[in-house]
């Protein structure tokens, strides 16, 4: 049995094998593997006795359920109107300039990916971004450059 098969079986054992268990199981795969592979989707479909298309439809609908490999640090910039009005575009430009990649890309060393996402729930402190599970608010381009530098120092 492969590692992903074992993970899916364990998650199904924990959450159940009904259609309502799909989202918690997908979230469990994200926690462990940081993305949901095509193989994982097939295994979930088998385990829950639903179509692979239904699993893929759910996985691809939610922006926090990545269906492709990302960097070690996934940067999600809020794209709501509030963040846009408060300087989201300058934040994205600072990230792209600092990391030398564009929105939707991953650095060659596989450390950082930049994505946009719907509301992070921090509109009152816009602009906001999330790096994995860490929230950063009231951002400026200078703050963004320092935050990225701090992550790079952690890696060194």
Image (cartoon, grey):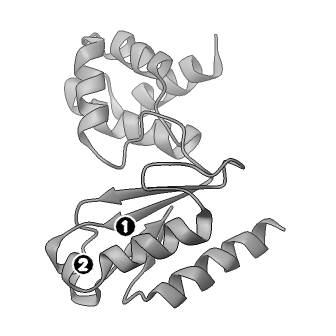
Residue 77: which disc? 1
Determine crowd level at label 2: few under 14, some 14-19, many 20+ residues with C-alpha closer than 10 A: many
Q: Which mark is residue 83?
A: 2
Residue at the outermost right position? 156
Depth order, front residue of 50/139: 139
Residue 69 lies, in percent from the top left, at 54, 37
Quadrant (top left/top right/bottom left/bottom right) for the C terminus: bottom right
Q: Residue at x 50, y 48 (%)?
A: 105
Q: Residue at x 19, y 69 (%)?
A: 80
Horizontal and vertical percent position of residue 154? 76, 72
**Number of dots carrying numbers:** 2
Q: Is residue 89 above or below residue 59?
A: below
Q: Is residue 112 left or right of residue 41?
A: right
Cα separation between marks 2 and 1? 9 Å
Q: Is residue 70 above or below residue 155?
A: above
Which quadrant would the N terminus be assigned to in this image?
top right
Task: Using the image, determine if residue 45 lies above or below residue 20.
Answer: above
| Contact? badges 2 and 1 (CB < 8 Å) | yes
99 left or right, relative to 39? right
Q: Quadrant of residue 13?
A: top left
Point 31% across, 76% down: residue: 88
Q: Position of residue 99 (x, y in %)?
A: 60, 64
Residue 129 position in % (x across, y down): 40, 72
Foreground: 72 or 87? Answer: 87
* Residue 59 falls left or right of residue 20: right
Which element carries disc 1, helix, strand or loop? Answer: strand
Label 2: state its secondary structure: helix
Of the two numbered discs 2 and 1 on the same chain, state the one appearing first in sequence.
1
């Amino acid at each position: 049995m492969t590692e992903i098969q074992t993970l899916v079986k364990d998650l199904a054992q924990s959450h159940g094998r009904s259609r309502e268990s799909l989202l918690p199981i997908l979230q469990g795969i994200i926690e462990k593997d940081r993305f949901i592979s095509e193989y994982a989707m097939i295994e979930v479909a088998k385990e829950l006795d639903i179509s692979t298309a239904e699993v893929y439809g759910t996985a691809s609908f939610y922006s926090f359920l990545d269906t492709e490999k990302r960097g070690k640090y996934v940067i999600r910039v809020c794209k709501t109107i509030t963040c846009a009005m408060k300087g989201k575009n300058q934040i994205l430009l600072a990230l792209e300039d600092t990391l030398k990649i564009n929105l939707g890309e991953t650095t060659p060393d596989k450390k950082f990916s930049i994505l946009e996402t719907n509301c992070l729930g921090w509109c009152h402190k816009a602009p906001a971004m999330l790096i994995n599970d860490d929230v950063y608010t009231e951002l400026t381009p200078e703050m963004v450059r320092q935050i990225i530098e701090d992550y790079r120092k952690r890696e060194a």
